[in-house]
């Protein structure tokens, strides 16, 4: 029995099947493109930075409508977050220094407690960069009370401006690193603070008006930097005949000399519960370095810099940075 050939399919049926094929191909193409796009974004943050160690992946913003949910979610009370940071450190008031320090070089250092006119200063010498100290007991014989400034002229001539028993400034000198002292002479011609009047300074040409309420002083020859009660620094290059514009620094704590410029310290700034130091060229303060963590008391830090060494006397501690204050021994 012969089989009759099937009649040709109507045009509408052929068009329908063709359309189905086209839709299937389009869906496959869309799926492939989506997979390729997802794989190309792995390992990169939104701005193209690598997300390896040290690079955080950005957290996408997700609205509640976008959250997948197959079952009704239960209401969960959020747990209180634990704070990863300690209480913010308290600022330290700008105050007169309770100690001073000076350097002849990186080995020979001299330091003194400031004391008051009713007490007696204590002076010490170090010949090994602060590793050990020798007290100068004979300074008591000079009648010096409140120490105002150390002048480290050279190894065989160290001078100290201090108040005498009548609270008047005088100058005493030692030629043998504190074993003995010469008789006091007048202090005229030297830089020093006037404790009874913070609006006046002793200078190379006699008394001069201070540029502010002077709290601390770092000076040599014709130049000087004054730390003011409003946490600013003001500098002169001409023995106090003129003064530069104030440079305000948050939480200023101390000022000292460095080679041709100054070194300054701040206390309890940012995350540093302690002291940080930086260079000051007279118009700009550089970047502050590493943190010496400690409980800071107003006026309890004295510092001086020689080359890359910063010598810092902080309370009962004496520490030395060998890289300009960028780091400190632990």
Image (cartoon, grey):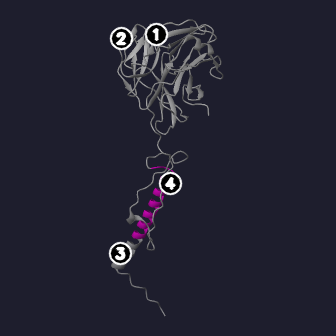
Q: Which mark is residue 241?
A: 2
Classed neighbour count for the residue bearing mark 3: other residues with Cα under 10 Å, few (<14), some (14–19), many (≥20)? few
Q: CA distance from mark 4 to mark 2?
A: 57 Å
Mark 1 or 2, nearer chain start: 1
Label 4: how many Cα within 10 Å (few below 14, some 14–19, many 20+): few
SS under mark 2: loop
Q: Quadrant of residue 240?
A: top left
Q: Which mark is residue 134?
A: none
User: Looking at the image, is mark 4 or mark 2 nearer the viewer?
Assistant: 2
Query: Rounded to the nearest whole Å, what is the CA distance between mark 2 and mark 3?
Result: 101 Å
SS class, disc 1: loop
Q: Nearer the viewer, residue 8 or 211?
A: 211
Span shown in magenta: 22-45
Q: Nearer the viewer, mark 4 or mark 1?
A: 1
| Between discs 4 and 2, the one toward the N terminus | 4
- How many numbered marks have been drawn onto this rendered protein structure? 4
For marks 1 and 3, give the CA distance. Answer: 107 Å
């Amino acid at each position: 029995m012969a089989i009759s050939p099937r009649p040709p399919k109507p045009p509408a049926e052929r068009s329908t099947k063709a359309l189905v094929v086209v839709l299937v191909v389009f869906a496959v193409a869309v799926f492939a493109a989506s997979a390729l796009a997802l794989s190309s974004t792995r390992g990169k943050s939104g701005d193209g930075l690598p997300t390896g160690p040290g690079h955080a992946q950005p957290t996408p913003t997700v609205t509640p409508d976008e959250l997948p949910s197959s079952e009704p979610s239960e209401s969960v009370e959020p747990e209180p977050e634990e704070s990863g940071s300690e209480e913010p450190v308290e600022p330290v008031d700008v105050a007169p220094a309770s100690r001073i320090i000076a350097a002849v070089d990186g080995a020979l250092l001299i330091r003194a407690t400031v004391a008051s006119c009713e007490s007696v200063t204590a002076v010490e010498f170090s010949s090994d960069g602060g590793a050990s100290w020798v007290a100068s007991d004979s300074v008591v014989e000079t009648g010096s009370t409140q120490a105002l400034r150390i002048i480290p002229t050279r190894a065989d001539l160290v001078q100290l401006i201090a108040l005498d028993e009548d609270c008047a400034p005088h100058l005493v000198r030692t030629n043998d690193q504190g074993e003995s002292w010469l008789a006091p002479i007048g202090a005229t011609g030297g830089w020093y603070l006037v404790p009874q009047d913070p609006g006046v300074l002793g200078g190379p040409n006699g008394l001069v008006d201070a540029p502010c309420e002077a709290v601390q002083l770092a000076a040599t020859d014709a130049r000087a930097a004054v730390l003011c009660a409003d946490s600013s620094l003001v500098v002169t290059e001409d023995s106090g005949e003129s003064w530069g514009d104030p440079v305000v620094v948050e939480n200023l704590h101390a000022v000292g000399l460095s080679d041709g410029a100054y070194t300054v310290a701040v206390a309890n700034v940012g995350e540093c519960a302690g002291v940080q130091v930086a260079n000051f060229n007279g118009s700009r303060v550089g970047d502050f370095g590493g943190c010496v963590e400690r409980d800071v008391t107003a006026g309890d830090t004295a510092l001086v810099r020689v080359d890359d060494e910063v010598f810092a006397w902080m309370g009962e501690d004496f520490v030395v940075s060998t890289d300009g204050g960028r780091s400190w021994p632990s």
